[in-house]
Amino acid sequence: MITNNAAETQAIAADLARTLHGGEVIALIGDLGAGKTTFVQGLALALGVTDRVKSPTFSVMNEYQVPDSRSPGLVNHKISRIIHVDLYRLQTDAELTALSLADERRADTILLIEWPNAVSVDLAPDITVTINHLGEDAREITIATK
Ligand SMILES: Nc1ncnc2c1ncn2[C@@H]1O[C@H](COP(=O)(O)OP(=O)(O)OP(=O)(O)O)[C@@H](O)[C@H]1O
Ligand SMILES: [Mg+2]
């Protein structure tokens, strides 16, 4: 899919959100500034998250509570939280181990990982979102499910 602004990318993320049941691991692939965090914002909003989703560039891992009330159009899910990680700054396996990412893969969780290839993550994603920066505000978004 092609998008021409951040809102269009967030709308695609919202569409994906409506198909999630809980337990999914989503890998986000794309250059710096491609729109990975923007995508997560759209996905979280669609699931009813009211906190502002910020880049985990420095925090590495951010957690958001998903409210009980079902937003219209969602499948009957058991999602109670979103974990958003950005592995860009991680450099050692020890840092990765300290995160215990595998423990965050839970039936009540959507785990979204930016820069999953920055370190040797041993966590096969269920869904891979690839965002290609075509230029200016144009992006090509590919969503692949395993
Ligand atoms: N079509 C588009 N889709 C997504 N973002 C867009 C689009 N057009 C412009 N933008 C802008 O591009 C920027 C994307 O930044 P974002 O933080 O989401 O990137 P990122 O892939 O998470 O980068 P990083 O690897 O540094 O974390 C935002 O400022 C967003 O508003
Ligand atoms: Mg980001």
Image (cartoon, rainbow, N blue to C red):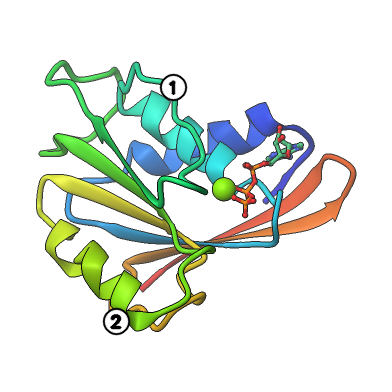
In this picture, is 8 found above or below 108? above
Which residue lies at the image location 70% right of the left edge and 51% below the top edge? 34
Q: In front: 62, or 65?
A: 62
- Image label count: 2
Locate residue 92, reporting x and y percent. Answer: 41, 79
Crowding near the residue tagged with mark 2, few <14, some 14–19, many ≥20 C-alpha atoms within 10 Å: few
Residue 103: image location, x then y, percent: 12, 63
The amino acid beneath tag 1 is Arg
In the picture of the structure, the residue carrying the numbered disc 1 is 52
Q: In which quarter of the image is ligand 1?
A: top right
Reply above or below: 94 against 21: below
Which residue is nearer to you in this view: 22 or 50? Answer: 50
Q: Is residue 116 left or right of residue 140?
A: left
Instruction: Judge whether residue 101 can be spotted in this image.
Output: no
Q: In which quarter of the image is residue 98?
A: bottom left
Q: For ligand 1, tell me if the residue under mark 1 lies within 8 Å.
A: no
Dot 2 falls on a residue whose secondary structure is loop
Q: Nearer the viewer, residue 110 or 2?
A: 110
Q: In this view, does 37 lie to the left or right of 44?
A: right
Which quarter of the rendered picture does the C terminus lie within? bottom left
* Circle 1: element type: loop
Look at 25% across and 57% down and name the residue there.
24
* Amino acid type, mark 2: Asp
Image vertical order of residue 51 relative to residue 41, above or below: above
Of the numbered discs 2 and 1, the one sitting upstream in the chain is 1
- Tags 2 and 1 in contact by the CB under 8 Å rule? no
Image coords of residue 139 (percent x, y): 75, 49
The x, y position of residue 97, in whole percent, is 24, 74
Seen at 68% across and 32% down, the residue is 6
Which residue position is annotated with label 2?
122
